[in-house]
Amino acid sequence: MSAGHADPFHHVRNSQHIELPGFLTDGGLTLPTLHIFGAELPITKYMVLQVIAALLAGFIMRGLAVRVANGQAVHGRFWNFWEAMALYIRDKVVRPAIGVPHDDHHHDDHHPAELAHSLDAGGTTGSPILAGTNGMAMVAVGHPADKYLPFVWSVFFYILFCNLLGAIPFMGSATADLNVTGPLAICVFAAVVMYGIQRSGFLGFWKSLAPSMDLPGPLGYILLPMIWVIEFIGLLIKHIVLAVRLFANMMAGHTVLGVILGFIAQTADSGFLWYGVMPASIVGQIFIGLLELFVAFLQAYVFAFLTSLFIGAAVNPH
C-alpha cells in the first residue's frame, strides 16, 4: 500500500523498527534485542509506547495526588482537566456501576451541618478533601466502591495514554495489538476474582456464579452444575470480549487512516488523478483523525466502565 512495504498493515503492527522523519534518523530507529540468561528478548515499539503511557499515567496521578493532599483546590487548566476526568470516572462510572453491598452502611448521608462542624473544628470526616468551586473545599465522604478506584483509574489512564500515543505520527497505539489488550483483560479478570474472593470468600465467590434457586432435590443436582458451568464460561467470555473490543476498535481506526493515506501513494504515477486524490485523502484523514481522537477517550471509558461492572457483579453476587 505504501512504497517500500509489501505488508499494507505494517503501520499498525508491532515491530522492532520505529519509523521517524528523515531529518531525525535516516530510515527510522531499530530497537535492540536484549540477551538475558541466554534467551533473546527483543525490545519492540509497543513495549516502548507502553512504558511511556505508564509514565504519563503515573505523572498525572502523582501530580493530582500532591495537589489535593493539603485540601486546596487544584489550580491550572491542565490539572483541572485531569481532575475532572478522574472525578467523572469516580462519580459516574465506579460508584454507580459497583454500587453499595447490601451489608455495608453508606456514609454519604451526613447532615451538612455535621460536615461544617467537622471542618470548623479542624477535623475531618475520615475522607479526602476534594477541590470545590470558588476556592471552597468540599468533603467527599467515603463510598464503599472507592476501594476499587485505584485499579479502575490505573486501567483508564493507562489505556487512554496508549490510545492517544497512536494519534502521534510515526508512533502507534499499543492497544491495537491483541498481545496488549489480552494481558489487560487477564489483569481485570484476576482483579475481579480477587475482589470477589475478598468479599465472599473462596468458596462463596465461586458458588455465587450460580444463582440461588428453589428447586426440588433431584432437579437441583442436575440443573445447578449446568448453570454454574454456563456462568463460568460466560465470565471467561466477557473478559475475552473485553480484550477483543478494545483491540478491534483501535486496529480498525488506524487501518482506515492508513488506507486513506495509501490512496495517495497508489495514484502517485497517475498524473492528473493524483491532484484530486491527494487533497481528498488529506481532508478525509483529518476528519477521521479527529474521530480517532474521540474514540481514544471513548474506548478507555468503555473499558473502565465494563471493568467496574464486572467488579460490581463479583462483590455483589446475585
Image (cartoon, rainbow, N blue to C red):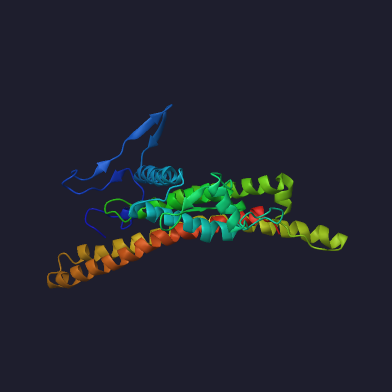
Give the residue drawn at x 52%, y 58%: 91
Q: Position of residue 265 (x, y in %)?
A: 20, 62
Q: Position of residue 286 (x, y in %)?
A: 26, 65
Which residue is outermost to the top?
37
Which residue is outermost to the left?
271
In this view of the protein, which residue sits in the foreground, 144 or 155?
Answer: 144
- The quarter of the image holding the C terminus is bottom right
Give the residue drawn at x 65%, y 53%: 315
Give the residue drawn at x 55%, y 56%: 94
In this view of the protein, which residue sits in the foreground, 76 or 158?
Answer: 76
In this view of the protein, which residue sits in the foreground, 318 or 172?
Answer: 318
Does residue 163 appear anywhere in the picture? no
Question: Would residue 245 be found to the left or right of residue 35 on screen?
Answer: right
Whether residue 275 is situated above or below residue 165 in the rendered picture: below
Q: Position of residue 68 (x, y in %)?
A: 44, 46
Marks counted in the figure total 0
Which residue is outermost to the right?
217
Does residue 279 appear anywhere in the picture? yes
Residue 3 is drawn in which quadrant? Answer: bottom left
- The quarter of the image holding the N terminus is bottom left
Q: Position of residue 9 (x, y in %)?
A: 33, 56
